[in-house]
Amino acid sequence: MVGAGPNGLVAAITLAQAGWNVTVLEAASTPGGGMRSQELTLPDFVHDVCSAVHPLAVASPAFRELFADETAARRHGLAWLHPEVPLAHPLDGGGAALLHRSVETTAAGLGVDASAYQRLVQPFVDAGLDLTDGLLAPLNVPPAHPIHLARFGLHGVWSARGLARRRFDTDEAQALFAGLAAHSILSLRAPITAGYGLMLGTLAHSVGWPVAQGGSQRIADALVSVLESHGGRVECDHRVGSLRELPPSDVTLLDVTPRQLLNLAGDELPSRYRRSLERFRYGPGVFKLDWALDGPIPWTNPEIARAATVHLGGTLDEIVQAEDIVQQGRHAEQPFVLLAQQSVVDPDRAPAGSHTAWGYCHVPNGSAVDMTGRIEAQVERFAPGFRDRILARHSMNTAAMERHGENYVGGDINGGVADLRQYLIRPTLGLHPWTTPLDGVYLCSSSTPPGGGVHGMCGLHAANEVLRAHR
Ligand SMILES: Cc1cc2nc3c(=O)[nH]c(=O)nc-3n(C[C@H](O)[C@H](O)[C@H](O)COP(=O)(O)OP(=O)(O)OC[C@H]3O[C@@H](n4cnc5c(N)ncnc54)[C@H](O)[C@@H]3O)c2cc1C
C-alpha cells in the first residue's frame, strides 16, 4: 500500500482483516493524509491541518463497520464530539440560519420556508443511513434501496442555485442550502450541486457534523491502531518515487491521484489508459488559515457560537457569485469561507480560555494569492472585533497544501473535480475504476468513486476489488 490517508488505511485494514500481510508506505512523518493535526500556531494549540468536520466519517459504512459503537471507537482512542448545533450561517444585520439535528427545529427558524424545508429534507432523513449507503456504494452493483436513490436523484441532479430558488423564498433557507452545496467546489449553477447540498444537509440531521476529540489526527491514529490489531503496519517517512522501488508483493494499492500514478508508473502504462489519466481534471484549490485566539469569536449573533461549523458568505446570490469567480480562474473579493471553531466543542484544543479556529476559501488551482485579508474580512463582517482576538495565525496557499499532501494537486482537496462527468468517470470510464491495466496494481484514493472526504469508501471498494480478484 502506498499512502496512509483515510482511503489507504481503510483499504489496508480490509485486506489485513481478510488475512493478508499488509505494509503501508507513507511519505509523511505521520500517518493520516488529510486527517492530521499539528500545533501550527502556538504551543498547546492543536489545529487540524486538513479535514476538521466529519459527517462523512460518522455515516460511512466503512467506519461504521470498524467502529461499531462508541466503546469500540474509544478503544482505539477515537471519540466524536457533537456541537449543540451542527452548522450556522450568519447573515448581515444579525440574522442567521441554524441547522439543528432536528428537522423541525431547523424548519422553525426558516420563517415562511419552514414547511418547504421540511417537505424537502424529511424524506431523506427518514431514509436514514440506507440513503447514505446507496450514495457511497459502487456504481457497478444494483442499489439496495432504489426508491430512496431515485427520489434523491430527482432533486439532487439539479443545480443548487436552481433548487434553492425554486423551493425557498427566505434569504436564510436559500443561503443555508448554498453554503452546504458549496462544499462541492463547483459552480452552484452546475448539475448535481443540489445533490451535494442535500446529502450534507441530511447528514447534519441524521448523524451530526462532529469533530474528533483532540484533533483529526486521532481518526488516523485509530485507523492505524485497528490495522496493527490485524497484523498490518505503517512505515512513515517512506516516499515511493516509482513502482519499481516497491518490495515484491502480490498486490499494490495506491492512495494517489492520476497525476502521481503517471509519475509512479513511468512508461509502463498502456498509452490509452495513460491518455485517459492525462485527461483527468483537477479543480480549484484552497487557501487555508488557522488561528490561535485569546477568546471565542465575538459573533454579532450569539447563536453562532453554538455551532462548530460556520458558513460565511452571505446570501445565495453572493455565494453563487463567489464560487463562479473561482471557476473563472479569478479570486473573489468576498469569498465563501468555511470556518470551524473546534474548541467550542473540544476545549482541550487550546489552553484554558483560548480558542482555535480553522477556515478556508476556494481559489483557482495553483493560486499563489494570499487570501488572509479577504477571509478575515468575511469573519469580521459577522464578528466585529475578531481580528483583535488573534494571537497567531498560520496560512497555507495551494503550494503549501500540496507540500503537505501530494494528492492535493494545485491545492485541489477533492482529488479531482467532482462534477457530473467526473462523478461517473473517476478517474477512467469503466465498471471497475479502482483497477489499472498493470497486473495487481489498484488505485484507492479519492480520485476513485465515491470521491473526496474522509469516509474511506474509495479504499473499501478498491480492497473489495482485490479480494474479488483473488477469491
Ligand atoms: C484543507 C482541507 C480541508 C478538508 N476538510 C474536510 C472536512 O472537514 N471533512 C472531510 O470529510 N474531508 C475534508 N477534506 C478532504 C479529505 O481530507 C480528503 O478528501 C481525504 O483525506 C482524501 O483521502 P485519501 O486517502 O484519498 O488521500 P489523502 O488523505 O490525501 O492521503 C494520501 C496519502 O498518501 C501519501 N502519499 C501520496 N503519494 C505518496 C508516495 N508517492 N509515497 C508515499 N506516500 C504517498 C500522502 O502523503 C498522504 O498521506 C479536507 C481536505 C483539506 C486539504
Image: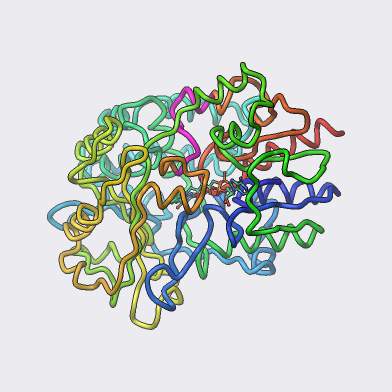
Furthest-left residue in view?
A: 93
Q: Nearer the viewer, residue 261 or 434?
A: 261
From where the camera sits, is residue 105 visible?
no
What is the number of callouts on the image? Answer: 0
Q: Quadrant of residue 333?
A: top left
Magenta stretch encompasses residue 414:
yes
- Give percent across and percent down for residue 1: 71, 46
Give the residue drawn at x 50%, y 66%: 215
Residue 313 left/right relative to 290:
left
Residue 294 left/right relative to 50:
left
Give the residue drawn at x 67%, y 20%: 270
Q: Nearer the viewer, residue 168 or 247?
A: 247
Magenta stretch encompasses residue 10:
no
Furthest-top residue in view?
A: 272
Q: Establish if 405 lies above or below 256.
A: below
Task: Please report the bounds of the magenta region as a residue range.
Answer: 413-424
Residue 135 left/right relative to 169:
right
Q: Nearer the viewer, residue 117 or 329?
A: 329
Q: Quadrant of residue 362?
A: top left
- Give percent across and percent down for residue 118: 37, 41
From where the camera sits, is residue 171 visible?
yes
Q: Establish if 273 lies above or below 90.
A: above
Q: Nearer the viewer, residue 181 or 458?
A: 458
